Structure formats: structure tokens, C-alpha cells
Amino acid sequence: MENLPWFLLLIPFASAAIIQLGLKRNAMASSLLSTASVFITLIIAFLLLGKDSASSLTWIEAGNFKLEIGYQLDQLATGMMIVVTGIGFLVHVFSLGYMNDDEAKARYFGCLSLFMFSMTGIVLASNFAMMFIFWELVGLSSYLLIGHWYQKDSAADAAKKAFLVNRIGDFGFMIGILMLWGITGTIVFADMDGASLGTVCSCLAGTAILLVFCGAVGKSAQLPLHVWLPDAMEGPTPVSALIHAATMVAAGVYMMARLYISVGADMIPTWSADTIAWVGGITSLAAALMATQQSDIKKILAYSTLSQLGYMVMAVGLVEPDTGMFHLYTHAWFKALLFLGSACVIFACHHEQNIWKMGGLLKKMPLTGGTFAAGYAALIAVPYVTAGFYSKEEILTAAHGSPLFWVAAFVAFLTTFYMTRLFVVAFLGKSRSENADHAKEVGPIMFVPLIVLAALAIAAGFKPVAELLNAQDPRVEGREHPPIALIVSIVSLVLGLAAGFILYKGKTSDPLSIPLFRNKFYLDEIYQKLVTIFQDAVAAIVHFFDEFIIGGLLVGGATRSAQGVGNIFRNFAQNGKLSGYAYLMGLGAVLVIYFTVFAN
Amino acid sequence: MPFDSLPTPSLNEYLMISGLLFAIGLAGVIIRRNIIVIFMCLEMMLAAASLTLVAFSRFNTVDGLPDYDGQMLVFFVITVAAAEVAVGLAIIVSLYRARQTIHTDELTTLKG
Amino acid sequence: MPSFLFYIFAAIMLIGGTMVVFMRNPVSSALSMVLSFLGLAALFVGLNAYLIGILQILVYAGAIMVLFIFIIMLLDLKKEEKNTFRPAAVAAGIVIPLLLVIQLAGVINKQPDSPKAPQLELKQAAANFDEGTMINKRLSDERLPDTHLIGDKLYTDYNFPLQMVAVLLLVATIGCVTLSKKNTK
């Protein structure tokens, strides 16, 4: 029992290692092994619910500095663990069906196990160093899984982009960890003393917090580092569901919540918390705007994920990490559901992802359509019957009294609008292509996970369920909800539904065309240009420096001056005449005597 | 002894004389082009060094006797010089065989 | 040694040296060198280094000088007709040694009251040597047994260098033979 948490780490790791080292040729065995390993970790996660313990092994010891590998179990970790292993298990099961015909099934499941190992590491980590290591490991597994179909250029590029963009965030994260270490004197979460943040200038403490937040910006795809997430949809759709919707991208929020709990939410300097909140708010707004004009079903969901992550980060920034974690928890279920549903749709439509070439799918795939509708309802926060409503309500409550409230409300309207658009266009009406015409319901191994997720998407917000799953629930404090939050929520829902249905009912092409949103505010292009210009400038400077300063002046100058001096001396001194040499030697002796005896 | 009452030279005079001999040797090395003469001048420079050694040996008495360590050194210098002259002259002979000259002006293989 | 004898022999030595440098004929140079070394040997004797003085004459005048003349004869070197002394070389060859001498004078000037040669205390020194040995007997007779003293040092303190010198001479002999050998393939 004592060592149970270690098995959470070891079992996925063993699975990944066995698949990678021994089972690469045996796709069936590796997929079953990987799924079994997640199932066991899920059981362990359930066994550990409500536990509060910590343990660690010393990894590196240098002087009085100790680096530990350890776990810290508390409500935050065990609740997150359920989300990770639960969705992980369902996605594994789903993948058994979805990836059945894939050529590199063994590699896929090996990477999934590696991801489960890394994600477990982040959740269990007892200190920042360990978290950072596993943080990089999820980055790696995300890279491997996005690039699963590396034969496609777009997938390989997307994987590279995700990795590089994450590196930018992680660099800030690392500096932030070091700064926090400098300020608090420890990197162990349990030993961190928030009071020491108050002893340094708030600009320093705030900078440290913001740099740590940089890691979250990268991993949770906040502005301005959000660009990798939509591209990451090049990976297999179950991967998008698990990594790029439910768990890994939420790791940033989890990490911020962990930080807040460790140092105490009150000690966070206001200005840095405000910055975080506004980054979240703007991300959610921008992503929602972009989502309204996408036509790729996965892209819409990806921008929706961005937008919801923005919500979570906003909640964290409003110094309510509980609220952020609660939304993370509910969002994980219904967003995984939506992605898996879209995976079914894509699977059924022979890898067609354009919603304008779908349509009428609800009749052809009633189970998928029904569960998708459940996820849709949860995302647009249908009052009282869906999980999304409860968490969104908490976020609106948290934002009450700040301009962010209206941002959040507008985003809620946009969310309803674009999700209605997606649902109306893809599932209602008539099918608009042959692929959609021939769509059939998927097999049980794929729709069973959908049904489980649909049940959770509806029920996860109810108090007993949330308590059972040990989620961070801000509602236990029994605080007042301002009535305006509920009103705004319902108004935005109704407006969004109305706008969506009126605009898109029975349409065969998009009646609205806003290039700015469709092209994601041209951010990718701007980045491209900026990077090109910046890189060219740096390259030119470096080239100039290398070619002329180092090559020409330092290295070349040294050789040329040596050569020149050598030539001079060779011409007049090294003339091959013995008496000349004797003369110079005598001169040298005279000079040596002069400098040693007379010069001082 | 008949001359005991006469003044004797001081150490400085010996050093000066040996320095002059050394300078003459050096001048010969620089001026002359006949390698055998240069070699002779080198011998003179060596002898000048010997003179200082013997002078120091005489002017620093140990237990009433000259410091024989200095004279030992001169003894070895003479021996080594003899060996050196033998080898050096052998080299000059083979040089002459190879180049038909012993004039340093014409021996400029070292020119860079 | 009285000062006037010192100056006479020093003059002989320096004049001999100068003649080595300025004689056009190598044979004359070699003979001038003997003259110079004779003066030097006399100075050695004046410094109570009788053995060294004799060796100087025997080795240099007797052996080395003969060797020089032999080689000069062997190579059949003629008197250098012209261009023996080029002005530039002469100027350089005078300036540098002159500078050296000036520097030496400067160093010597720093200690104007230079010591005279101390008196040798032969009787007193005899006490350091065993009764009945030749050195002890000579020293007791107020005579400087300088050959014995050098021999004594040579076979005690300088035994190892002496053997090394023997090896050196052997090497020099072999070297000469190798160098002089005609290159017969």
C-alpha cells in the first residue's frame, strides 16, 4: 500500500520499455499490454483516492543541495490522476479500434505508454525539478505522437513546430524554477514557503511566477505560443483527445494550481496574477473567434480547446486555482468525448475532416451523434444538466466584477455559436458528399468509451460525482453566485443557439466569410515573417561576425600578422649568413644584459 | 720572494681582461668569414670564460687554499673544448668535401 | 703576481687575440692564437693555477693548434685575397663587443674597491689533510701542491664527471671517425 504510488509511475514505464525494446513487431500484444497497463494504473488511481501522503528517493546529492524523485499525493494530485488515467484508459480502448489497421500500431501504443508515464510523473511530482523532467518527457511523447504519421510532411512539420514552440515556453519555465529556487530556497512543493515571496521585491517575485507561467503558456497553448496546438491535430485523433485536449495541455493549469497551493495563493503578486488572467482571457477570446471560421472538424475542436484552456488560465490568474482545476476536470471529459466523437466521424467518413462535406450524420450514426450531442451540450453549458455548466458558472463567478467577466460571457456566446455551427453542419441536414453518405456506425469497442465519456460529461459536474472522483471543487465553500452570472450564461446560450441555427440551418457553404478569423489573425504568417526577418538578421550579424571579425580579424589577423612579421624577419634576419646570426645573438645578449642589470 | 712588496692586480682587472678577450673573440666571430678562424675565435671566448673561473677560484680562498671547484670546472672545459675542436674540425672537413668552401658567405643553406 | 707582469701578459694575450681576428692568413691566425694562449697560461700561473696553465699550453698550443694547422694544410687554404673585411661586418663586429665591454665596465664600476688576491695560508690548510700524505708534507713546507690537490678532488668529488668526460671523449672519437669516413655506398 505504501509503495502503491510508485507503481503508478513504474507500470506505464515498464509497458513503454517492453514495447519499445521487445514487442515492436507484435502489434496485437503491445496494444493489449499498453491498455492493460493503463487499466492497472486506473485501478491504482482509484485505490489512492483521498490519500494524502508523500515519499521521495534521493536522486542527486551535492553538498546541502538534494534533488529528489518523489511523489506527493493530495486532493489535487489524486483528482488529476483520475482524469489522466480514466481518459487515458478510455482512449487506449478506443485506439484499439481506431488504430486497428495502422501499420505502426506497436509504436503508437509504446508512445502512448510513454505519455502515460510522463503525465503520471507530472501529476505525482513532489518538486519542480522532477516536474520539469516529466514536463519535457510529455513534450517528447507529444512530439512522437503528433508525428506518428511522419510520412506526411504536414505531420512531421507539426511535430517539429509543437516541440520548438514548447521549448520556448520551457526555457522560461526553467528560468522561473531557478528564480523560485533562489527566492524560496527550495524546489520541493511541500517545503515552499510563500512568505519568502513577500520578502523580495514584488517585481522579482512576480517575474518568477510569470516565468514559471511561461511553461504553462507553452504547454497549455496560451497566446502567443498557441500556434502549435491547431497544427498538432495532424496526429491521430485519439491522441488529440488524450494529449491535446484533456490531459497534457491541461498540465499547465495543473502546474499553476500546484504552484499556487505550494506558495499560497495570497502571496502571488497582484500584477503577475492579473497578467496571467488577461493572457487567459485574451486567449479564450481570440481562439473562440478563430474557431467560428474553421471548416476542419478537428481544428474547430482544437480552437475550442484553446478557448477553454484560456478560461482555466483566466481562473488561475484570478487567484482561484480551484475553479481552474474544476473546469479542467469537467472539460477533460467532454472535450475527450468530442474528440473521440469526431474521430468516429472521421473514421466513418473515410478520413474526411471538412464539416462542409459531412452532414446528416446523426441519422447514420445515432450513437456517435448522440454522445457527440452530449459533449456539445456540456461544452455550451446547458444549464443544470451538464457538467460544463457548473464549471463555467464558477468561472463567471470568479471573474465577476472584473472586465474579464464580459470577455468570458462573450466567449460563452461564441462557444455556443461555433459549436452549434459544427453540430448543425456536420450532423444535421443532408449529407453533402459520398463519404458522408456511406458513413456507418462504428463498432462497440469505439462507442463504448464514448458512452462512458458522455455519461461523465453530463454527470461530472454533480456534487456527489465530483466528490467521488476527488475533484477540486470550488462549490464546497458555499459561496454566493451573483445572479448576473446565471443570466449572462443563459442569455449567451440562447443567443448563440439562435444565431447558429438561423445562420447555418440547411446551408451547404459558409454564409459568413471573415478571412481574419479563418486565417487565425494571420498569426502564423506574422510569426513566419518575424522569425524569418529576425533569423535572417541574426544570421547576417553572426555571419558578418564569423566571417570578418573572427575569421578575418582574429584568426586571419593572427595568421597574417605572424606571417607578415615572419616574412619581414626572414627577409632581413634569416639571411643564412653565419656572421649575421652571430651579430644578432650578440645584440640579444647585450639587450638581455641591459634589461637585467641596467634597466632598473 | 723578490716581488712580494709590489702591488698586485685586483679581481676587477682580471674580469676586465677576460671580458676584453671575450669581446675580441666575439668580434672575430662576427667579422671573419673563414669558418676555421671563427672556430678559433670561439675557442678564445671559451678561454676567456676559463680565465674568470680561475680568477674567482683564486680570489675566494677556502681554508687558505684556492677554491679548487673553479679549477675543476676549467679542467673539464679544456677537456670538452678539445673534444669539441676534434668534432668541429671533422665537421668542417666533411663540409669542405661537400661544398668545396669554408666561407660562411657561400654557406647560406639556412636562408629562409 | 705583481701588477706589471700581469699587464705584460694580459697585453700579450689581447694582442694575440686581436691578431687572430685581423690576420688574413689562417695559419697566422692559428699561430697568433698560440701566442694569446701563452699569455693566458701565464695569467693562470700568476693565479697559482699551475696545472691549468700547463694544461692550457699543452692542450691548446700542443694539440688543438696543431690540429687547426693540420686541417688548414689539409684543406689547402690560401690567404684570403680580398673581401676579408667588409666595412659593414667590421663595424658590427666592433660595435657589439664594444657594447659588451662597456656594459662589463659598468658592472665592474659598481664595485670600485675590488678585492686583492688573499694570501694563501698553506700551513694552516695542511691541518685539513692527513699526516704523512704528500699534500700535507708539501703544504707544511709552504709549497702549493696544486696538481696533488686537483688529483685529490678529481678522484673523490669529481669521480663521476671524470668518467663522463671519458665517455665524452670516446663519443667524440667515434664521431670524428664517422664524420671523416668517405661516403662509400
Image (cartoon, coloured by chain):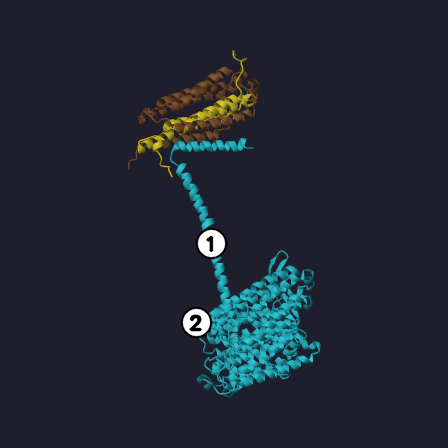
Chain colours: A cyan, B yellow, C brown
Marks 1 and 2 belong to one chain? yes
Q: Residues within 10 Å of mark 2 (few under 14, many from 20)?
A: few
Disc number placed over residue C100 in the picture, else none: none
Q: Quadrant of the N terminus of chain A?
A: bottom right
Q: Nearer the viewer, residue A55 or A95?
A: A95
Q: In the current view of this chain or complex, which residue is farthest to the top?
A: B2
Relative height, residue A385 to residue A287 (above, below): below
Q: Nearer the viewer, mark 1 or mark 2?
A: 1
Give coordinates of residue A71: x percent, y percent: 62, 68
Quadrant of the rendered structure where residue A76 is?
Answer: bottom right
Between the residue at mark 1 and the residue at mark 2, the CA separation in whole angstroms equals: 37 Å
- Give the residue type at disc 2: Gln
What's the chain of the residue with tag 1?
A
Quadrant of the rendered structure where residue B94 is?
Answer: top left
Judge from the rendering whether residue A579 lies leftward or rightward of residue C125; answer left or right: left
- Mark 1–mark 2 CB contact (< 8 Å): no
Q: Nearer the viewer, residue C120 or A298?
A: A298
What's the chain of the residue with tag 2?
A
Say which residue label 1 marks.
A546
Q: Residues within 10 Å of mark 1 (few under 14, many from 20)?
A: some
Q: Nearer the viewer, residue C128 or C75?
A: C75
- Give the residue type at disc 1: Asp
**Helix, strand or loop for disc 1:** helix
At 41% from the left and 41% from the top, the residue drawn is A567
Say which residue label 2 marks.
A151
